[in-house]
Image (cartoon, rainbow, N blue to C red):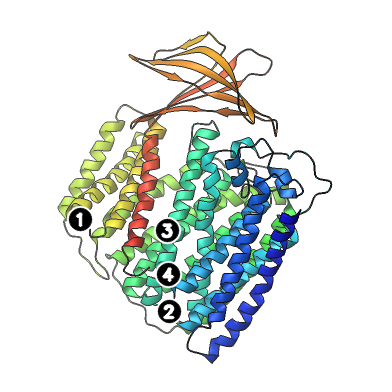
Amino acid sequence: MIYSSIGYYALILGLIVSFPIFFFSIKNFRDSKILDSKIISFSFIQLLLVILSFFVLIISFVYSDFTNETVLNNSHTTKPLFYKISGTWGNHEGSLLLWLLVLNLFIFVFLLESRNMLKNYRILTVLFQQIIIIGFFIFLIDSSNPFNYVFPPPDEGLGLNPILQDPVLAIHPPILYLGYVGSSIILSSALAATTMNYISKVWATHIKKWILISWIFLTLGILLGSIWAYYELGWGGFWFWDPVENVSLMPWLALTALLHCVLVLEKRSTLSSWVIILSITTFILSMGGTFLVRSGILNSVHTFASDPERGVFILSFLFLLVFISLFVFFIFHKSNKQEPVSFSFLSKETSILINNWLMMYFLSVVLIGTIYPIFLDVVSSEQISVGPPFYHKLIIPFLIPFLIFMAIGPQLRWIKSELNGKLQLMCLMIISFLISYLILKNFGNNLLINTVLIGSAFYLFLITIRDLLKKKSQNLSQNISHLGFSLLILSILFNNIFSSEIITNLKVGETFKNEKFKIKFDNLRKFQDKNYISFKGYFLIEEGTTSEKLEPELRVYNQPNIITSEADIKTTFLSDKFITMNTVQNNEHFNIRYQVKPFMLWIWISVLLISLGGTVSFFKRKKL
């Protein structure tokens, strides 16, 4: 009980500290040329109070303090220590407390890091960020208190969903939140700079590193979520266009477009309106994703809460932030009289702008596919599910010009350019489509669209490889990210086209055989772990002259009492062999799902390359 009291009152004090931050910020706005040290001091105190509150919640989970309602609902005494700690943010209340912690951390680091920027710009950024911070303080204290008291306390908790008890998913939310919440500083900074008429090359250089931080962590967070979905959910896939997956993809698309726009602003002092709009859009999408996940509106294995009242608060707060952002943009950005820099059609600016339009199109498709079923349910009570075919049909045709512009754009110059090396670029394109045709010659019905799509990805791949070898360290970060993206598209396409799957029912001792595979169910053994019972199957897979032993599991957890299926995966550089087993009701047989998934490892490697490109760009800067 004492832990909960400390954590709760630390939140109350943290909210109270916002008022002196506002007071000294407004007072210091006109009175001095130097930022008042009291603003930094109180920001530090606020950060310490939120850290204390978060640390208290961790202690409550570690010691299984079931007087705390959050611990009661999401932990159990038999749960391993690692999952007790990760259970702190594996629930609605704890995850929002983590949001608040990162919000405070980022604004404090911003104050320390931005000493060379205009004082009033720094103050306005603090004020805009404090509006967001106060909103989350009120939300936590009023409707999502992680320190609610339970009396009398029960002897045991209800436990954490077993599919969330996973090492990758334990670190997935903090990484993802660093990406989500990083966009709050981008928004606050953009609104402050717009108000001060400070959107310039200097500001672009300054905010670029915050965009990179948010983008890198969001990329890695999405990667970790995809890896978890691949091996934990037992479906053998890494992306299912699940609504909550889409919620993380949308701000990533907006951030990627923003990153390219800020490069133009940094070099040419143009596209300032796009930069502001995308800064607003990115955080609104992050907040909107929080609303969708935390309100319980979305039906997904990822959702943590099912309380529409909480969703109403987030939605109202979201509308407030949208109103403030649009007010600042339309009122203050109009006063910017700087003449725009014109550029020709054949220029680097044009290629970036076209690809940004395409990314906004992809974003719109994902947004419609995610939101439309919700509106349809509200208006007509009709429930539908928007699946992969919708996204594939609308996105794939436009992915082709997107890849081609990604390949050609870096070859152009700023403002006006002539396409140098036309013959070489044309030859590489012909080679790319020829390679694609030869690979696909004997596969699939959609030979034309697959040939063009894979050829476009190969084109980007070959040109990026050429640039890496030719230009060496010049544009290294861009080339690494573009190489990773081309590998990602190629790996996904080959994975979809060349995957094979067998679904059958077997009992111990039986064998499944077809012209390609032989699957023998050798044995089934029972094991006891700390918080679950494991039934491990032993399978021998024969393919041609090669054989592989695979050992999938069924786990029966004690609290909550849930059965999960754990895949066994054998990974090589070229393919994964993936097998799961599930019980068949009232039957001795088990449902066996065996898949061969080509180039799975390269999907993970390619995303790491994409984020590595951003990391190289971040650290190559002279001043961080």
Q: Is residue 91 left or right of residue 207?
A: right
Query: Tag 3: residue type?
Result: Thr
Q: Give above or below for 83 relative to 213.
A: above
The residue nearer to you, when weighing 462 against 449, is: 462
Residue bearing mark 1: 472
Where disc 3 sits, the SS reads: helix
Q: Position of residue 403 (x, y in %)?
A: 33, 50
Question: Residue 256 got which mark?
Answer: 3
Q: Nearer the viewer, mark 2 or mark 4?
A: 2
Q: Position of residue 270 (x, y in %)?
A: 37, 74
The 10 Å Cα crowd at callout 2, few under 14, some 14 to 19, many 20 or more, is: few
Residue bearing mark 2: 117
The residue nearer to you, when weighing 373 against 56, is: 56
Where disc 1 sits, the SS reads: loop
Query: Tag 4: residue type?
Result: Ile
Query: Tag 2: residue type?
Result: Met
Residue bearing mark 4: 207
Where disc 2 sits, the SS reads: loop
Q: Nearer the viewer, mark 2 or mark 1?
A: 2
Quarter holding residue 441 = top left
Q: Give above or below for 274 relative to 615.
A: below
Q: Nearer the viewer, mark 3 or mark 1?
A: 1
The span from disc 2 to disc 4 (Cα, nearest Å) is 11 Å
The span from disc 2 to disc 3 (Cα, nearest Å) is 25 Å
Query: Tag 1: residue type?
Result: Lys
Please report the residue visible at 24 percent of the width from the left and 62 percent of the height from the top. Answer: 412
